[in-house]
Image (cartoon, helix red, strand yellow):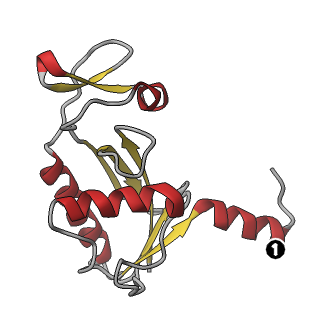
Amino acid sequence: MVVVFYDLETTSLRKDSEIIAIGAVTPRGCEFDEYIKPTIDVHPRATEKNGLRLCRDRNALVNANNGKIIPSSDRATGLLKFINHLKKVSTNGENEIILVSHKAFHHNSQGNFFSCWQVAHNNFQFDSIVLENNLKELGTSLSGLDIKMADSIDVMVQLQKTKGFSH
């Protein structure tokens, strides 16, 4: 089993937003970092959180603080790079992947559980839904991978209960 911690930056705070950045890391230090040029404007509230915006006259994703262009892929390329990254980390002798975010989903739209765990912060309520929606729009999914989702909030709650940790 390999755990992949990931985070998304998006065009808005809505679940139907586009992904504009994906970052991921494993405990062994295998990293992934990809910026994705959006096809829609970045909402000002999202820009406040992620520091990114779409500059239409330059047709580029830019740093909102200094206006510098951020090299970025188109959506299909960026998301496929992420899928390939997950395939790579799962073929290093580790078949099962746990994707960890802060709030994630546990199963795909058909109700099938994944055998890879993905953990992100807010994964169940946001990241995994946005990731699944963006992949679906491109006609692809994570279904070929043995993936389970986890949420770092749930991990921290369990640690607090079992180990007596507090915030």
Mark 1: which amino acid?
Thr
Quarter where residue 12 is shown? top left
Residue at 40%, 61% (x, y): give it: 129
Is residue 155 in view from this perspective? yes
Choose between 141 and 109: the one closer to the eye.
Answer: 109
Quarter where residue 103 is shown? bottom right
Local packing at callout 1 (Cα closer than 10 Å; few below 14, some 14-19, many 20+) is few
Q: Count how many numbered circles sit on residues in the image.
A: 1
Residue at 24%, 70% (x, y): give it: 141
108 lies left or right of 160: left
Q: Position of residue 145 (x, y in %)?
A: 28, 79
Q: Give the residue pinned by disc 1.
A: 162
- Whether 66 is drawn above or below 163: the answer is above
Q: Position of residue 71 (x, y in %)?
A: 18, 31
Quarter where residue 50 is shown? top left
87 lies left or right of 24: left
Choose between 100 and 104: the one closer to the eye.
Answer: 104
Q: Quadrant of the N terminus?
A: bottom left
159 lies left or right of 28: right
Residue at the far right in the pictured view: 164
Is residue 101 in view from this perspective? no
Residue at the far bottom in the pictured view: 112
- Whether 12 is drawn above or below 23: the answer is above
- Whether 13 is drawn above or below 107: the answer is above
Q: Position of residue 34 (x, y in %)?
A: 26, 45
Q: Position of residue 85 (x, y in %)?
A: 25, 62
Residue at the far top in the pictured view: 66
Q: Which SS class for mark 1?
A: helix
